Amino acid sequence: MALPFLPGNSFNSSIGKSHFHKSQAFGFIGAGEVPRLEGSKPGIGGKLLLGQSTAQNLSVYPKGLGGDKPAWVAFDKQVLRFFAYFQEAVQESRVEQYRVRSSVILFYLEDDTIQVNEPKIENSGMPQGTLIRRHRVPLPAPNDERFYRVEDMNVGKDIVLHGKIFRITDCDEFTRNFLRKLGVRIPPSETTPKDPYTMHQGEKSATMQPFRPYDKVDNLRQFLDHDREVLKFFCYWDDSDTMFGDMREMELHYFLADDTIEVVEKIPPNSGRDAVPMFLRRSKLHKTLIPLQLPGVVANRTVLNVFGPMGHGGRYLLDSLKTGAVEREHYHESDLTIGAVINVWGRKLLLCNCDEFTKEFYNSKYNIVNFESITLSQPSVTEVKRQLPPYNGFGSEVDSQASCLNLIPKQPKQDFKKFIDKDRDGLNSNVLRFVGKLDTTRPIDMDRRFIVFYHLSDDTFTVFEPPQRNSGIIGGKFLERGPIAKPKRSESDPTSHYQAEDLYIGSRVEFNKHKFVFIDADEYALRYMEKHSDQFPHANISLILSKLRGPAASYIQHVEDAFAGADIDNKKQLPFDKFRVVALSLAQGMLNDHELMTLARHYGDKVYPLLSSLIRIIQKDLKLRNFTGFSQLLAALKSCDKYDEGFVSKEKLRHVCHTIGLPLSDQLVDGAVMNCGSKFGGPIDYNQFVQLLNWKDHPLPVETGTKVAAGTSGSWSASVEGWTSTLGPIHYNALIEDLKTH
């Protein structure tokens, strides 16, 4: 008998104790890495508080074995699945007193959460699906401070989840293997009791006969097996028997998913037919044509008899045997073969060929090997060439042609890529300049000279006439910029325009009924043509030499004697005038003026103009371009002179000129360098170089009638004839050696 809890009748609980510490409230997750607050620690001295119980050892493995990964990593996406049922009482029903409801219990190992799902039953009348959402479920009282763990789940156990008693009857194979590894003995599976109401409804449905039965056609398997599989046949429809009919090319598509057919017509261009998307819309194609029946004759079901009034309150019987149904046979895949004739609503289509997928399909299913295509003879079609009307002179010819090609005239398209590539870029103007004269016998026009500009960016021409004193002709712009068409031999010939390949020294062109002969070109044009010798054959030294090697091989000694006879001083070189006379006499019409110029430039020396003429040209160019940065140029050159000697190398000077943006060509810079007290390869006096260029502080007086040297960019108002006199002596010995080489 216990003593009353009164003063003097109780014992001191601290007697015999040696530990009076306060338990630590913090613990660690994993291998002591993440701290957390735990509320289930004991009291003073390790004594359990009221309502506390010792924690169970949840692992059968000794401590220290296994990995250190946390549960949410080690058991990620691992779920135990149990099959269970629970009984639910049914009130106020004479059919059933209880109902058995099957369910699936999912136990997530990563966080010990539970989810309960109920399979959906047709016409159950109950909300089914997820009965209990995923969360941690507490144990029933008095252990409701704990949650269900894996050791609480096993086959044959009754578990209480929020007041419902679930009986576990079975589990899947993964769950069995997992529990066996934990050392848990799994009882054999149990059978789920049958639901009385479900059995009653099943017996009732088995004896029920529908008043209006329907035939269920299940084509799901065919759709899943042959979805997106289409047999393609190439066919023809011969419609030549009708007025204005012809052979029409078709494509027949047979869809294996639902045995439907569509026909697409291939309409050739300029056929005069409307481009309709479909010749036959996708549907089942019947083999025979049946005339249009009255409403109700062709129906899915046949009414045998009607009782009572029509409409509401009446009854009728249906023919379940389908004695009055009309069967219509449609085309199947077995009916489609190469050479077969398909009746498409009265139009006979001949199947001539098929694609590779169709051949593989018939080979694998019907063991057909021969797929020889049928070729039909098409009537010959004469191509009618479009003839454009002659140019009437209004506007440009390209605009006039656009109004003939389209109903709504469109703006002519330009070659934008060519315009970008050949547009002016710094000192690279991409403009070829030629000197021309009129090809005429009129004395007043024989001495006139013209400067022809050819713009590579858009293949247009501009013609200027330099003014000449006491000539009686006002100089200036002779022809506005634009493309120039070549003269036609007849009105039916297509219009073609002059291109860069048609321009060279000695060529004859006709600009708007004015005939010109090109007698010279500037240095940039000659360099450009020699650089792009594949486009300009008259500037290709290899082609010129190959043209001369054949005839010169037989009389090479005569060539040597001719050049040696012209070389009186025996210097192995000739001036251009003598070289031209000898070359023309030996070539016998095989070379034109531009090819002679190419030979002279290849085997000749450069001759720079006099200092005064060159400086006037340079200063005039800089003044026209409004260049005034001479102080910056001098400062940049001084920065390259480390020892302040007043001299820099030619490479550094050219680099500084390009960096500052000096608007002069390399040839003009080289000519100025030659007159700055330096020899080839030697240092350059940059103070003198800047002084020669400075048109503001050291201008030179303008000299009238100055001849412009080849390769300069001076004004075209100067006298331009006689450029070829700036060529140096030509070494004919090197030319003879190249002619001997094959």
Image: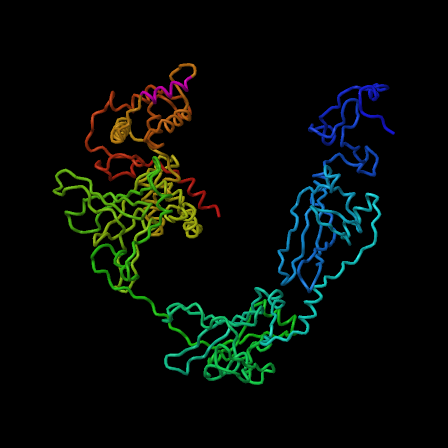
Magenta residue span? 631-641
> x%, y% of residue 466?
20, 40
User: Compared with residue 343, is residue 258 higher up or lower down, i.e. above or below?
Assistant: above
Total marks placed: 0
Which quarter of the picture shows residue 522? top left
Position of the N terminus by quadrant: top right
- Asked if residue 716 lies in the magenta stretch, the reply is no
Q: Which residue is drawn at 69% across and 65% down?
A: 95
> x%, y% of residue 515?
23, 52
Taking depth in this image into account, of 77 and 671 the one nearest to the observer is 77
What colour scheme governs how the chains and residues are painted in the rendered image of this protein? rainbow
625 horizontally vs 295: left or right: left
> Is the stretch drawn in magenta largely helix, strand or loop?
helix
216 horizontally vs 626: left or right: right
Q: Residue at x 27, y 45 (%)?
A: 519
Q: Which residue is drawn at 34% across and 52% down?
A: 588
User: Compared with residue 302, is residue 614 higher up or lower down, i.e. above or below?
Assistant: above
320 horizontally vs 554: left or right: right
Residue situated furthest right in the rendering:
1
> x%, y% of residue 318?
57, 81
- Asked if residue 640 lies in the magenta stretch, the reply is yes
121 horizontally vs 641: left or right: right
> x%, y% of residue 510?
24, 53
Taking depth in this image into account, of 207 and 218 the one nearest to the observer is 207
Which quarter of the picture shows residue 612? top left
